Image (tube, rainbow, N blue to C red):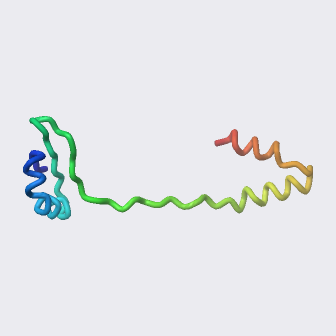
Amino acid sequence: MLTTTVRNTRINLTKLLKLVGQGDHVIIKSRSTPVAMLVPYEKPVRRGFPDLTEFRNLMKAHIRKTGDATAEIRAERDSR
């Protein structure tokens, strides 16, 4: 982990970005106080939507029986 000043960061930003691209972390200090950290970029992990097929089938069956799915939806919501 490398430590540098704000002034040095402005002067050597390209070099610091190359170091960060290689996996290093850079702490930027202003008057001996850490104010920022440059870290390698990590692509965010995308979470998909859950498979709701089972829930939809349950709703269809409940609506066929009772004509109303409100109670089933509340029960499903409360179980989370």
Q: Residue 47 at x, y = what percent? A: 50, 59
Residue 79 image-quadrant placement: top right
Residue 55 % position (x, y): 73, 56
Q: Quadrant of the C terminus?
A: top right
| Residue at (11% x, 50% y) in the render | 2
Q: Residue at x 8, y 56 (%)?
A: 11
User: Which residue is drawn at the image coordinates 47% and 61% (left, top)?
Assistant: 46
x and y, in percent, of residue 21 in the image? 20, 63
Side of 67 where 16 appears, left or right: left
Please give the count of numbered marks on the rendered protein.
0
Q: Position of residue 72 (x, y in %)?
A: 79, 46
Q: Is residue 2 above or below residue 23?
A: above
Is residue 42 shown left or right of residue 37?
right
Instruction: State whether residue 34 is above or below residue 48.
Output: above
Question: Which residue appears at 75% of the width and 59% of the height?
Answer: 56
Asked if residue 74 lies left or right of residue 12, the reply is right
Q: Which one is in front, 74 or 4?
A: 4
19 with respect to 58 (left or right) = left
Q: Is residue 57 above or below residue 35?
A: below
